[in-house]
Image: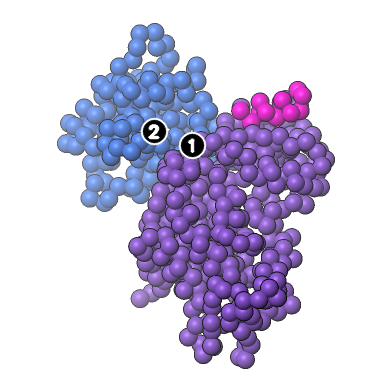
Amino acid sequence: MKVEIKFGGLGGQGIITMGFILANAAALYDGKECVFTQDYSAEARGGASTSEVIISDEDIDYPHVEKADYLVLMSTSAYRDYIHKLKDDGILIIDEDLVRLPEGENRKVYAIPATKIAEKLGNPIVANIVMLGFFTEVTGIISPDAMMQAIKDRVPKRFWEINERAFQEGMKHAEKNL
Amino acid sequence: MTEKHLKEGYYFWSGDVAAAEGAIAAGCRFYAGYPITPSSEIAEQMALRLPQVGGRFIEMEDEIGSIAAIIGASWTGERAMTATAGPGISLMNENIGLAVMTEVPIVVVNAMRGAPSTGLPTLIGQGDLMQARYGSHGSYEIISLYPNSIQETFDLMFDAFNLAEKYRVPVIYLLDGLLAHMYERVYVPPREEWEKRIVRRKRARKGQLPYEPDEDLVPPMPLIGEGFRIHATGLTHDERGYPNLTPQAQEKLIRRLNEKILRHEREIWKVEEFMTEDADVIVVSFGGESRAVKAAVKKARKEGIKAGMLRLITIWPFPWEYIRKYSADFIVAELNYGQIYHKVREYAETKVHKLNKMGGEIHTPDEVLKRIREVSGK
């Protein structure tokens, strides 16, 4: 099994953090081979931001995504920049309020108002964790326990609670709507 | 204060963090540096971790000061390191020559980025391979190592320090913009196990002259603060360390500085030979780029093309025997306009082809595969 995932959005949305948490979960808590790479522009916020995760049962040679099985997007500009990286039968996962899809996008799309859900939880900053919960439930490629462990590794203790709720809201949204 | 050492287990690290942790595990206890992308996280990790193991971290005013500080620290017996990139390594080169001439063990990490000048600060380049060898003025030999995974970045640090100490020579530890910021899982063995890997430098005996070599051409090192009378100069010197500005002294010293490395090159060489045995085409590569090459070789094999990869882990002294021994054609895949290509041509008795990208990203496996197909005629 080899799965390639690409995340895309804007600086400040936690795009790199999403990839890191998923990769850390796969490598340390699900015991998989895993590579994580990142790329971002010079701006602190608002520039293009992307991260890539490859999860495999075997050694990983080429560390970048060649063709993504999953493309997870948090901005329309990221759609434009990275859609060519998605396999023809790949799956698109988007924040439905932030990504406007062009007509004729025929691939399988899973949409969630991740940022709105995060705002309702009291802090839009956890939108990426809502998205990760959604991603975890939709794809089934990683265990929720491993993801929660990895979230705790990354987030200061005082924010564990809101991040845990954000992750669960994301999972629930997938259960309810799919 | 009790020291806080790494516990056995799995870690999810970037190349920068693995380089720092590998250095500390290999006994490094002094780091002086000036942060620069993509090596900055090495300084960050060292600043955090060195005080926890009884070591010292100092942020210097620039790269010239940084390398001067580690040369001084090494004279006190510490295993000392600095890390830099791009313009920083250019600034360090004069003092790398000083360390060669005064035979001071140090490890200098260069996380290669797109260049010349400020180039592409966050992105990979492989343009500093010749500079690692010839960066300072003069005719000398140096050791340079270059890993291609995060695990190897940790493990190879032991070799870097051991070789520096054993041969009293600077080791240029090459990383690149890809490895520096890429994360993979790393296994750290129990401390008792990794401490066994550490080789310490030979220490001078009382009454021995500071530059009096043993049979292996390496002089045991007297340490500052232990009662030795030490004179260290960048000028050509005799075995007492005093300037001796004659052609005879120069001939003797510079020949020895070269020979102490070349005579031991087979012990220093490390390469990975992947499916080379029956190969018609061998792709030579190193560092981040070799990850694409290995993927391409596997793809080529599936198409029935007998391709292989020769990955240089030791870049300098150049592992020429591994070129000479094959009768396959070579492709040299590198992120520059052609550097190691010329070294391979020097030793190959077959055809040598180029595959170059100027930096910013590694080749895709398909780009490498295309070149393999062209060269193999399939």
Q: Amino acid at mark 2?
A: Thr
Q: Within the image, what quadrant is residue B332 found in? A: top right
Q: Nearer the viewer, residue B367 or B338?
A: B338
The secondary structure that most of the magenta stretch takes on is helix
Element on which disc 2 rests: strand
Q: Does A15 sit above or below residue A151? A: above
Q: How many marks?
A: 2
- Does residue A84 belong to the magenta stretch? no
- Does residue B375 belong to the magenta stretch? yes
- Residue B170 appears in the picture as rendered: yes
Residue corresponding to mark 2: A50
Span of residues in magenta: B367-378
Tell me which chain appears blue. A
- Disc 2 crowd rating (10 Å Cα; few below 14, some 14-19, many 20+) is many
Residue located 29% across and 37% down the image: A43
Q: Does B314 sit above or below residue B359? A: below
Q: Nearer the viewer, residue A30 or B173?
A: B173
Tell me which chain appears purple. B
Marks 2 and 1 on same chain = no
